[in-house]
Amino acid sequence: MRVAVTGATGFIGTNLRAELEARGIENVSFVRRPFSTDSWNSSVLCGDIYTYSSDLYRRLGSPDVLIHLAWSGLPNYMSLHHIENELPAHYVFLKSLVQSGLSNLVVAGTCFEYGMQNGQLREDAVTIPTSPYGYAKSSLQRQLEFLKKDFYFNLTWCRLFYLFGIRQSGRSLYSQLKTAVDSGSSMFNMSGGEQLRDYLCVKSAAAYLADLAILRKDVGAVNICSGKPVSVRALVEGWIRENSWSIDLNLGHYPYTSYEPFAFWGDNSKLLSLLA
């Protein structure tokens, strides 16, 4: 089995490559800039979704599965760039691979597709995104579903909830907290922390993505999440406790965001059922 990965040098992609390697799965990374593979058995092909050759599928080694993680413009979720640039480019890119023979596609979606809905969210809930990022992702899934009417391929649409872990962007909550600790700060500024979210370690998410790729089934939408709501304050306090860090929280320093519901988490019963 051969798996191709886009966005392989990112937060999720780096952990996914490690997971594929640990399982002995042959893989190839499609990346914008070259990186060392000294510690990997994987191969690397340079390019991007805007400029690629018409024989890209063949150059990737005719993979059995593509796990598509690439997406630019984050974490500015409200930028029109996601609709005006990312959405059309990603659709054309994925369509070209399907036309060339790709039969299994696993794509990273987002919980932002659900919009401002509170409570536990199932995959069959109506998607009503309220951010350009969520709208672009939701639209891409629908475009690919239409594409399936003309070309046969399996589509697994992974709605990722909140991830944390090593190698995460410096602007993420976990990274900012760790940076504050490492710099010797006595106080960490954050929101009130009472909002409920669904957080999952990125290593677990990478394992789920690999599991779903191996299935090679037409899964449709599936939540990648813990299925457990936790307050942001409790989450941060847990990180501090687990790592024996010494830092106090300055709660209420930042306002709550306007583009996220106050309390929501994923239903992961479909995910667990698929992988049982």
Image (cartoon, grey):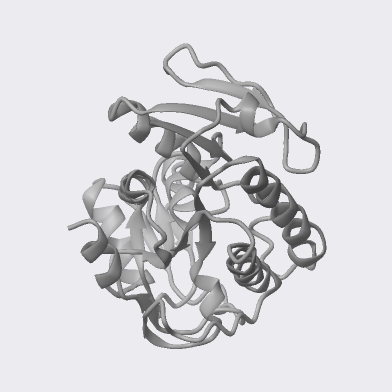
Using the rendered image of the protein, determine whether residue 194 is visible from the camera's viewpoint.
no
Q: Quadrant of residue 48?
A: top right
Using the rendered image of the protein, determine whether residue 247 is visible from the camera's viewpoint.
yes
Left-right relation of 113 to 209: right
Report x, y in % for residue 106: 48, 52
Report x, y in % for residue 248: 37, 61
* Farthest-out residue, top: 38
Report x, y in % for residue 252: 49, 77
Query: Measuring 44% from the left and 43% from the top, which residue is drawn there?
Result: 184
Left-right relation of 138 to 122: right
Look at the picture and state if 2 lies above or below 243: above
Q: Which quadrant, please, contains the C terminus?
A: bottom left
Report x, y in % for residue 12: 47, 44
* Farthest-out residue, left: 276
Query: Measuring 49% from the left and 70% from the top, which residue is drawn there?
Result: 111
Left-right relation of 107 to 228: right
Give the tally of numbered discs.
0
Q: Which quadrant, please, contains the N terminus?
A: top left
- Give the camera-side residue of 211 and 99: 99
- Give the camera-side residue of 207 and 265: 207
Query: Measuring 34% from the left and 64% from the top, which residue is drawn there?
Result: 225
- Give the camera-side residue of 108 and 79: 108
